[in-house]
Image (cartoon, rainbow, N blue to C red):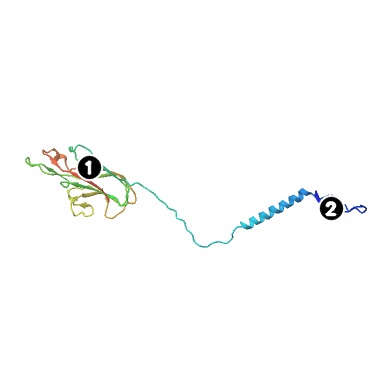
Amino acid sequence: MFLKWLETTPTHSPSPTKTYKIKTFKGLNYMKLLNYFFYSIIVLVFGLTSFSFAEDTTYDNSSTFQDWKLQRYQKKINRFVAAQAFSGQLKISESQLLGNFTVHNNTRDGYTVHLQTSNKATLIPQHSVDGEVSIPYSLSFSFSGDTATQVYQQTSDIDNADFSASDAGTYDPTLGRLIMGNLGNNTCSSPTDMDVAINLNVDSITAFRMAGIYEDTITLTYADK
């Protein structure tokens, strides 16, 4: 209900006394008008807010970049183990296992395994009082496991003739014959996990039945490049 003050003056009053009445205007809903008022304020505020945070449709064409650092760590594996298969006394046999070695390596520049013998693959007698003579022998190698295609492997037998400077690529006067490893500056594309068995072979066991003490020393040298 809406309220309005009206001022009236009586026509036959002896004194100019003023009286006041309150008149109501029917048909007007006060609460509805109040709601309209608040609604208008909300609409106004919302409109101002929308105007202030309107999406900017302009674009900045300048370049930008982000750095994404990537890292992968792999521990270096560099392990060589060699084991002799017996006490050192050769059997009377045309072929026998001398021992084996294992290589675990995951470096790009690789490694080398050389084999050297004191007497160039020959069993030399300690003396010749009973007519003893040297006994030549050969070595064969059996490879099992995984390695890179760039790694050289001595798959054929070697004997006295292979320990000479004529094989410059696979022979070193100090280290001996290259059995396994990288030639030159070749790099490896995959790790090596390899076991190699070494066998001694003689043409005939007859020489082993002859009296005497015959000796040679085999040295394996592993080097990580």
| 111 lies left or right of 121 | right
Residue at figure coordinates x 69%, y 54% from the top left: 43
Q: Give the CA separation, mark 2 to mark 1.
A: 131 Å
Q: Residue furthest left?
A: 129
Packing grade of label 1 (10 A; few <14, some 14-19, many >=20) is: some
Residue at figure coordinates x 68%, y 55% from the top left: 44
Q: Which mark is residue 155?
A: none
Query: Camera-side residue: 97 or 51?
Result: 51
Answer above or below: position of 121 versus 211.
below
Query: Camera-side residue: 59 or 83?
Result: 59
**Image coords of residue 10 (percent x, y):** 90, 53
Packing grade of label 2 (10 A; few <14, some 14-19, many >=20) is: few
| 55 lies left or right of 107 | right
Q: Secondary structure at mark 2?
A: strand
**Image coords of residue 9 (percent x, y):** 88, 54
Q: Residue furthest right?
A: 12
**Image coords of residue 60 (percent x, y):** 54, 62
Residue at figure coordinates x 80%, y 50% from the top left: 2
- What amino acid is labelled 2 in the image? Leu
Whether residue 153 is visible to the viewer of this picture, yes or no, is no
User: Which one is closest to the eye, mark 2 or mark 1?
Assistant: 2
- What amino acid is labelled 1 in the image? Asn
Q: Quadrant of residue 211?
A: top left
Q: Earlier in the sequence, mark 2 or mark 1?
A: 2
Residue for badge 1: 199
Q: Residue furthest front?
A: 15
**Image coords of residue 16 (percent x, y):** 88, 53
Whether residue 35 is visible to the viewer of this picture, yes or no, is yes
Q: Are marks 2 and 1 in contact (CB under 8 Å)?
A: no
Residue for badge 2: 6
Q: Residue furthest bottom?
A: 61
